[in-house]
Image (cartoon, rainbow, N blue to C red):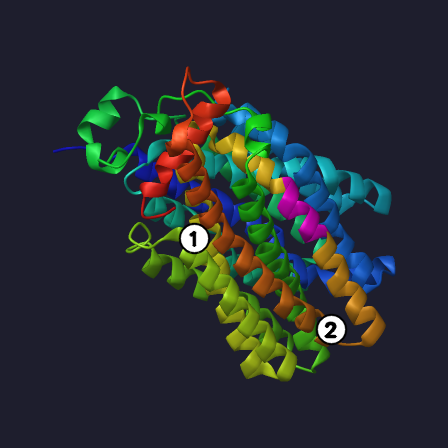
Amino acid sequence: MRRMYFGWYVVAAAIAANALLFGATYSAFGLYVLPVSAEFGLSRADMNTSLIFLNVGNAIISPLLGRLLDRVSARWIVVGSALLFGASLTILGLSESLWINAAVIIFPLALSMAGAGSLTMMALVARWFVAQRGRAMTLAAMGNAVSGVLGAPIAGYLISSQGWRHSLILSGAVGAVLLVAIGLFLRDRPGAADISDHPLEFRSGIATAGDDASAPAKVGDMLLQPQLWAMGVASALALCMSQAVSISLVPMALGQKLTLLQATSLASIAGSAAFIGKLLFSTVADRIDRVLLLTGIYSLGALANLAMFIGGGYPLLAMNAALLGVCVGIHVPSFNALLADRFGANSFGTVRGVMIPISATFGALSVRFAGAVFDRHGSYKYMFATFIVLHIAAAALMLSSKMLLAARAKFLAAGEKGALTPTRALQKRTARSSGRPGS
């Protein structure tokens, strides 16, 4: 009996790792807002600054970590990051100093989350799959959805029964142990036996040699490509707005005099919708043009913000939470698969590391903006009005990346000759990817 392709175990490991990391942080963040701000005397904008610090840390660390991932073993990066994650949450649970908290969030916590989860795991999935890359990345990203379904209720129970400090310490300890086990289980990339025994999972007729044989592209070469900036800014805008709305849902619900159970349920609704959306989308992920899909998701985001601008109440909040979950759930893996298609799996860590500072910068601005809007006006109306316009801009930018790639392919076909320089090799590889369904 033929053994299962190890790449699917990598996908399962990615689900578990992301569920642990996001469940203890982003998914549970809204539940920490009120008790932490009350203890330290912080405003809503000041409390949201902690996510700004996390985004700043990601922006600083990710380019270096992404480059490192394309050159050294991911296994030990995951193990080291797991220990750092546990230590970070423990310090946050014990600390009485805002300065210490800020320092922990900016560096060790940001590094541990990228190193044990989002960046490392997606780089591994990109290496293990070509023919079914979209499906694999969509399933791998289900950990974020699971974190919303399980992370918020668990954190809510721990906070109510043990207090927010013990909740952080317990989350860090359990998370570190489980993440170390996941890291020791991983393998960096498929071997000859994996590929020969499972050719359909790894390779297809439209794959190019650049997917598994090329050296990592240089950062400077990538930064010269207009399509990189169009894709990066579009994705960053969409993600930062989703993050701002996500962390505002629970405080919005409580501000509308809804019960804590109703407020907590919004995170579970978003997580459940993301989970179901990913599961259904995984069946068609490699049959849909990724650029057109992302353009549609950003347009849908504009409609969701319009609905929130017009009305309120639990039914609308629940509907928006579900829509947010579906859009974010499909957006992240589709964008990661698009990056791997355009730049090659062996350069995925590098290009994803370049993308993260862009999204982190926008994320820092958005969460601060969300808190400042509420502190000044007592509602989030101005936030939703702004986000309608920005979602439309993101859709236009993503669509333009397809045109930029077509223009580049036409330029190369018109006549670049001679020996391939590293820059030309990258350009030709990205041009070839335009023939794929996902480009």
The correct choice, above or below, for 408 with respect to 295 in the image is: above
The correct choice, above or below, for 117 with respect to 362 in the image is: above
Q: Is residue 68 visible?
A: yes
| Front in this rendered view, residue 274 or 205 | 205
Q: Quadrant of residue 222?
A: top right
Q: Quadrant of residue 188?
A: top left
Specify which label sits upstream in the sequence, 2 or 1. Answer: 1
- Residue 359 is a magenta residue: yes
Q: Dot 2: within a 10 Å radius of its alpha carbon, few (fewer than 14), some, or many (20 or more) residues?
A: some
**In the image, which residues are magenta?**
357-364
- What is the three-letter code of the residue carrying label 2? Tyr
Give the CA distance from mark 2 to mark 1. 29 Å
Q: Is residue 156 visible?
A: no
* Residue that mark 2 sits on: 382
Query: x, y percentage for residue 58?
Result: 66, 40
Query: x, y percentage for residue 213?
Result: 36, 21
Location of the N terminus (image quadrant): top left
Residue depicted at x 66% and y 72%: 384
* Residue that mark 1 sits on: 291
